[in-house]
Amino acid sequence: MTRPAPRGRWVVVAGLVIAALVVAELASGGGSEATGRAAPPLPAKALRPPGVDLASLHGKPALIDFFASWCAPCAEEAPTLRKLSAALGHRATVVAVDWDDAGGPARAFVRKHGWTFPVLADTSGKAGESYGLVGLPTSFVLDPQGRIVATFRGPQSVATLRRALLEAA
């Protein structure tokens, strides 16, 4: 007769499985996922003009990046978004959405990082909720028809985001 494995061993095995899933998530670029659903509306208030809406983004791919001034990983990713916007030219659009943040600190964040692309203010957090935010920063890649084709959680590289946008074209 064989003795069942002690409970402690199952806890260790479960822990290893969870750790492996976390490592796989991080290795995949922070959690990219394709969804194919229509992008929800963007906030109307422009923190850094020009204001944009989904209709104005149709015809070419777009990156919608949710951030907050108090978010350390967002500050880490900020130079990436500046470089990405410059590298894309008119092939795609970068739009940042300040999520559930105060106007003054958010404007200071935008100035500090030299962002020249549109930045919208989601002061109520409703736009973020409709996109399904679970953390910051989170970037959504839209195809030319305004459908979400990829989601990236956490700071990303210029190469990763550029590739996703060019593939969405």
Image (cartoon, rainbow, N blue to C red):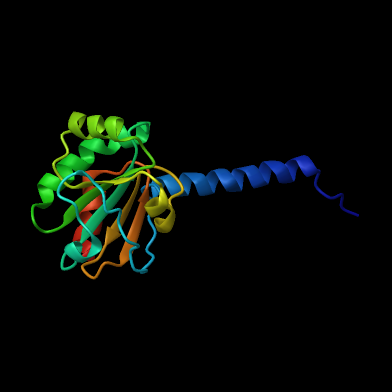
For the point 17% across and 46% down, the residue is 84
Q: Residue at x 35, y 62 (%)?
A: 40
How many labels, in total? Answer: 0
Please say whether residue 143 is visible from this viewpoint: yes
Residue 23 coordinates in the image, percent (x, y): 47, 44
Q: Quadrant of the C terminus?
A: bottom left
Above/below status of 92 relative to 135? below
**163 left or right of 1?**
left
Where residue 57 appears, x then y in whole percent? 19, 62
Picture quadrant of residue 105: top left
The image quarter in which residue 36 lies: bottom left
Q: Residue furthest left?
A: 89
Closer-to-camera residue (18/61)? 61
Relative to 117, 2 lies left or right: right
Res 31 visible: no
State the image coordinates of residue 9 (x, y, percent, origin top left): 74, 42
Measuring 24% from the left and 63% from the top, which residue is drawn there? 54
Q: Is residue 39 above or below residue 78?
A: below
Q: Is residue 107 left or right of residue 22?
A: left
Question: Quarter holding the N terminus?
Answer: bottom right
In-image side of 119 versus 70 (left or right): left
The one nearer the camera, 105 or 114, is 105
| Residue at the spot 22% in from the left edge and 48% down from the top edge | 159
